[in-house]
């Protein structure tokens, strides 16, 4: 069984820098576990690793598709599996780093398949979404399956339709079926490492991160993406940082309001990630201080978990 080291944490906690330092010390390569870093030219708002970082250390599962395309969890798992196989075959250690919890779960435990698609039901729901708008279907989902509606964005038509399709086919909310997916079986020999900060420090870092993105030109990046002939897929357009800036560029809010919303929505995302992280049993957590350098944290991890990490992979 291939060994994969997972480094997880809330958005803005510094896991990317720590993962790179750590990977360099153990002869590893990075496998990005981020549902928005897959998009080309969505660089600033996703805090994508710099060209210098990527040239000095291989990064996989970054820049896979155009911003106009949708991308499924199944596609991610297939891409990540290929990367892990290649890294391992070459004698390296895959270091999976990122904050998309559903990607982490699918990569470690497999995909939730659910019932087969019903073409007739899906067509009717898709037609309703076109006629009434995704928000109307999202409201219906909120009544049938509040837990699913809470985690699915009101504009994410594909996932809303699938959740309603499953409910109509089985009479059981998709969120309840997905809980049955929690078997605990692992697809890889997983070494789970978590990074966490106290809430005040996390919020401070999120605010600084949002300001840095604005200073780097997030508005111009989003404007250029919207100007592309194919535009942005609903999946790409709902990313935190992009959704708020799109509203600004469409005249729905001022730049200052967009900036404030980015900070608020990023903090809300971090809160959801903390909830997800409780599901990843067997994670060894490292508490980070406000001024801890990434190299020092990588050293702490290696010192504490070195024996486990050096164990021969079967």
Image: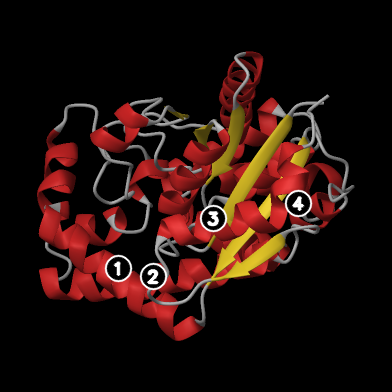
Q: Secondary structure at mark 4?
A: helix
Comparing 279 with 313, the one in front is 313
The residue singled out by tag 1 in the image is 262
Q: Nearer the viewer, mark 4 or mark 2?
A: 2
Q: Nearer the viewer, mark 4 or mark 3?
A: 3
Q: Does residue 140 show up?
A: no
- Does label 2 or label 3 sit earlier along the sequence? 2
The residue singled out by tag 3 in the image is 299
Percent from the top left, x then y, of residue 276?
A: 66, 62
- Does label 1 or label 3 sit earlier along the sequence? 1
The residue singled out by tag 2 in the image is 265
Report the residue at 76% width, 50% height from top: 167
Q: Secondary structure at mark 1?
A: helix
- Does label 4 or label 1 sit earlier along the sequence? 4
The residue singled out by tag 4 in the image is 174
Percent from the top left, x then y, of residue 294?
A: 42, 58
Q: Quadrant of the N terminus?
A: top right
Q: Secondary structure at mark 2?
A: helix
Dot 4: within a 10 Å radius of its alpha carbon, few (fewer than 14), some, or many (20 or more) residues? many
Q: Mark 4 to mark 2: distance in Å?
A: 25 Å
- Does label 4 or label 3 sit earlier along the sequence? 4
Residue 189 horizontal side relative to residue 128, left or right: right
């Amino acid at each position: 069984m291939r060994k994969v080291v997972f480094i997880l944490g809330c958005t803005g906690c510094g896991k990317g820098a720590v993962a790179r330092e750590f990977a360099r010390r153990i002869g590893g390569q990075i496998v990005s576990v981020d549902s928005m870093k897959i998009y080309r030219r969505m660089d600033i708002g996703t805090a994508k690793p710099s060209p210098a970082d990527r040239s000095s250390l291989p990064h996989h599962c970054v820049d896979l598709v155009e911003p106009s395309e949708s991308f499924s969890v199944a596609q991610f798992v297939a891409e990540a599996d290929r990367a892990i196989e290649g890294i391992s075959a070459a004698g390296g250690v895959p270091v999976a780093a990122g904050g998309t919890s559903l990607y982490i779960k699918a990569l470690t435990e497999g995909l939730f398949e659910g019932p087969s698609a019903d073409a007739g039901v899906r067509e009717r729901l898709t037609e309703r979404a076109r006629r009434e708008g995704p928000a109307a279907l999202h409201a219906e989902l909120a009544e049938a399956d509040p837990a699913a509606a809470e985690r699915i964005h009101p504009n994410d038509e594909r996932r809303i339709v699938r959740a309603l399709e499953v409910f109509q086919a089985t009479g059981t909310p998709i969120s309840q079926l997905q809980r049955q997916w929690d078997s605990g079986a692992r697809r890889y020999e997983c070494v789970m490492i978590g990074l966490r900060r106290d809430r005040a420090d996390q919020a401070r870092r999120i605010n600084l991160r949002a300001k840095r993105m604005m200073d780097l030109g997030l508005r111009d990046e989003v404007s250029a993406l919207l100007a592309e002939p194919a535009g942005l897929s609903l999946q790409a357009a709902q990313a935190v940082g992009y959704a708020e800036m799109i509203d600004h560029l469409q005249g729905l809010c001022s730049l200052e309001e967009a900036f404030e919303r980015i900070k608020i929505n990023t903090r809300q995302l971090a809160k959801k990630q903390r909830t997800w992280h409780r599901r990843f049993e067997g994670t060894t957590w490292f508490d980070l201080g406000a001024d801890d350098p990434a190299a020092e944290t990588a050293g702490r991890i290696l010192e504490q978990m070195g024996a486990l990490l050096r164990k021969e992979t079967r």
